[in-house]
Image (cartoon, rainbow, N blue to C red):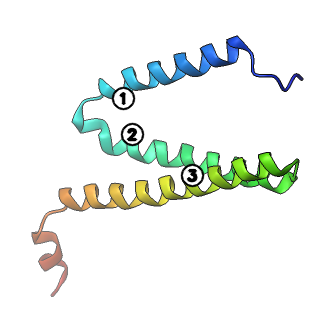
Amino acid sequence: MSTQLGISDIYIFILAGFLGFQLISRVPPLLHTPLMAATNAISGIALVGSIIVAGENYNLFTNVLAFIAIVCSTINVVGGFLITDRILKMFKKENSKSEKKP
């Protein structure tokens, strides 16, 4: 496998970014919470992958990139769960807290 970055790799990266932006911008607000949960799962997979790459200890450059990926994925996962929890709390009724108390 070649380690050189080809023009097709750059094309795929730009196309994926454009497609992702177009898809997310067209999502109705009702679906934001389920999508947040799905993206948190994907970020968790990215976190595990970056930990695996960091553990391989290829060279200094790879270790630095893996560390940056670990930090960014961790921030994304934690922030995503906090925001999802906050959104779900908005949908809870205030009466449900008082009904549980006898």
Spot the residue most to the bottom: 102
Q: Horizontal placement of 17 versus 54: left or right?
A: left
From the viewer's side, name the closer residue of 96 and 90: 90
Please give the residue where the numbered disc 1 appears in the rendered image. Answer: 24
Q: Are marks 1 and 2 in contact (CB under 8 Å)?
A: yes
Which mark's residue is nearer the viewer, 1 or 2? Answer: 1
Tell me, for residue 37, which label it has, or none. Answer: none
The alpha-carbon separation of the residues under discs 2 and 3 comes to 17 Å
Give coordinates of residue 92: x percent, y percent: 19, 61
Within-10-Å neighbours for mark 1: few <14, some 14–19, many 20+: few
Circle 3 — which element? helix
Q: Horizontal placement of 78 versus 46: left or right?
A: left
Give coordinates of residue 7: x percent, y percent: 69, 12
Q: What quarter of the picture does the N terminus occupy?
A: top right
What's the amino acid at mark 1? Ile
Q: Horizontal placement of 10 versus 3: left or right?
A: left
Going 37% across and 43% down the picture, which residue do you hit? Answer: 34
Within-10-Å neighbours for mark 2: few <14, some 14–19, many 20+: some
The alpha-carbon separation of the residues under discs 1 and 3 comes to 19 Å
The alpha-carbon separation of the residues under discs 1 and 2 comes to 9 Å
Give coordinates of residue 95: x percent, y percent: 10, 70
From the viewer's side, name the closer residue of 93 and 90: 90
Please give the residue where the numbered disc 3 appears in the rendered image. Answer: 73
What's the amino acid at mark 3? Ser
- Mark 2 or mark 3: whose residue is earlier in sequence: 2
Q: Is residue 22 above or below residue 24?
A: above
Give coordinates of residue 63: x percent, y percent: 78, 52
Circle 2 — which element? helix
- Mark 1 or mark 2: whose residue is earlier in sequence: 1
Please give the residue where the numbered disc 2 appears in the rendered image. Answer: 35
